Amino acid sequence: MNEAILELCKQLRLAHIAEAIDDVPFTTPEEFIYQLLLKEQKGREQAKIARNLKQARFIDTKTLETYEWHKDISLPKHLSKEELMKLDFIRRNENLILVGAPGTGKTHLASALGRRACEQGYEVRFYRVSHLVEELEQALVMGRLKQFRSKLEKVDLMILDEMGYLPFGKEGAELLFQIISECYEQKSLIITSNLEFSQWNRIFSDSRLTAALVDRLIHHAHIISYTGQSFRLANALSRK
């Protein structure tokens, strides 16, 4: 390929045109230009999806296509699984709260919805709650809390996994409360927990803080309940 064309593509940041210029089919000059621009558009879209997935920091590659909608999942009456998978709740800055026993599929659904959101152009962050609290406490000690919080401002969806699995101290609880409060009506949250809201005092020792937190979370929320036995336990028992 002509080095001058390569250099122009580089200067104009048309990386995907440079990759496709020898391969696009065409019969007219107009079609040639259209096909090149189409390649550039699709290339940028795929690059953005890959970047979104990397930045989200998912712990696995769970997808909605592999999700098992078992009989022990109880959706709100106003929400079908088809509507849920359209991700309209993100556009409306609404929350999803998945509550139930460990091993029933909550994290799989949360991660799969987050992955679908990345594919649709949303910025997503996945955190185990205990890890997020650790990062917040470390940022506070190092004087970088403001920078940490500013990185979350552009995020469209935050996934907070395993709320209530591990307790944390007063300082960590207050930092987490600040993050969730800043999301209120500004972005969507997906939270998974093995505890009913009435038991969240185990996580946050301050009852007033707990009440304020729950109030913000459920104001614009869809609550999905999981009942039944752990999949992991059932699989282990079946192998015996």
Image (spheres, rainbow, N blue to C red):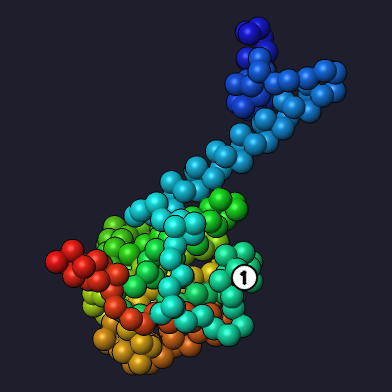
Q: Residue at x 21, y 68 (%)?
A: 238
Q: Is there any visible trace of residue 123 in the rendered image?
A: no
- Location of residue 24 by image quarter: top right
> Residue 236: x, y in percent?
19, 66
Q: Is there any visible trace of residue 63 in the rendered image?
A: yes
Q: Secondary structure at mark 1?
A: helix
Extreme residue toward the left, this view: 240
Q: What is the quadrant of the C terminus in the image?
A: bottom left
Q: Nearer the viewer, residue 111 or 27?
A: 27
> Residue 202: x, y in percent?
26, 86
- Location of residue 30 by image quarter: top right
Q: Nearer the viewer, residue 58 or 153?
A: 58
User: Label 1 sits on what residue type?
Assistant: Glu
> Residue 204: x, y in percent?
30, 84
Q: What is the quadrant of the N terminus in the image?
A: top right
For residue 151, above or below residue 101: above
Q: Residue at x 62, y 70 (%)?
A: 83
131 relative position to 92: left or right: left
Label count reads: 1
For residue 107, above or below residue 121: below
Q: Identify residue for label 1.
A: 83
